[in-house]
Amino acid sequence: MSYLEKIKWNADGMVPAVVQDARDGRVLMLAWMNPAALEKTLETRRTWFWSRSRRKFWMKGESSGHVQVVKDVAIDCDGDTLLVQVEPVGPACHEGFRSCFFRSLGKDDKAWAETEPRLLSPEEIYGRK
């Protein structure tokens, strides 16, 4: 049985991939992989995903230059989620934050608050105004 057959792909043929900073464990993002995206990730040691909204492959950092160098890929005990440990080159979030999870509920649990600084503006990332 190949490693791909051990993954429990969803009805759309995809699996969620949690991307984590290999240096300190910070969760950077969640994206979706299909078998081809996982194979491309393993081949290039850069993260590749399937965009459900755009219906196409994309490599993290293809337009911003903020790639993720893959250090390890693990599967959870149920076989239905991947953990991809990376060394990020620049922010993971397209809004310029280190992590896509840069907002948390405040003390009253009624409003979202930014919990980390923005590293770059979207204009700095993508060169647009």
Image (cartoon, rainbow, N blue to C red):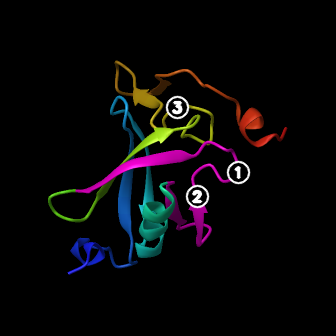
In the image, the segment drawn in magenta is 46-75
In magenta stretch: residue 47: yes
Q: Earlier in the sequence, mark 1 or mark 3?
A: 1
- Report the amino acid beneath label 3: Arg
For disc 3, the marked residue is 98
Measured as percent of width and height from the top left, residue 50 is found at 51, 67
Q: Residue at x 32, y 74 (%)?
A: 10
In magenta stretch: residue 35: no
Query: Would residue 127 appear left or right of 2 to someone viewing this image?
Result: right
Measured as percent of width and height from the top left, residue 84 is found at 36, 50
Residue sitting farthest toward the right:
129
Query: Would residue 37 appear left or right of 97 to someone viewing this image?
Result: left
Query: Would residue 4 appear left or right of 129 to someone viewing this image?
Result: left
Q: CA distance from mark 1 to mark 3?
A: 17 Å
- Report the amino acid beneath label 1: Ser
- Report the amino acid beneath label 2: Met
For disc 2, the marked residue is 59
Task: Depth check: give the residue in front, 53 or 39.
Answer: 39
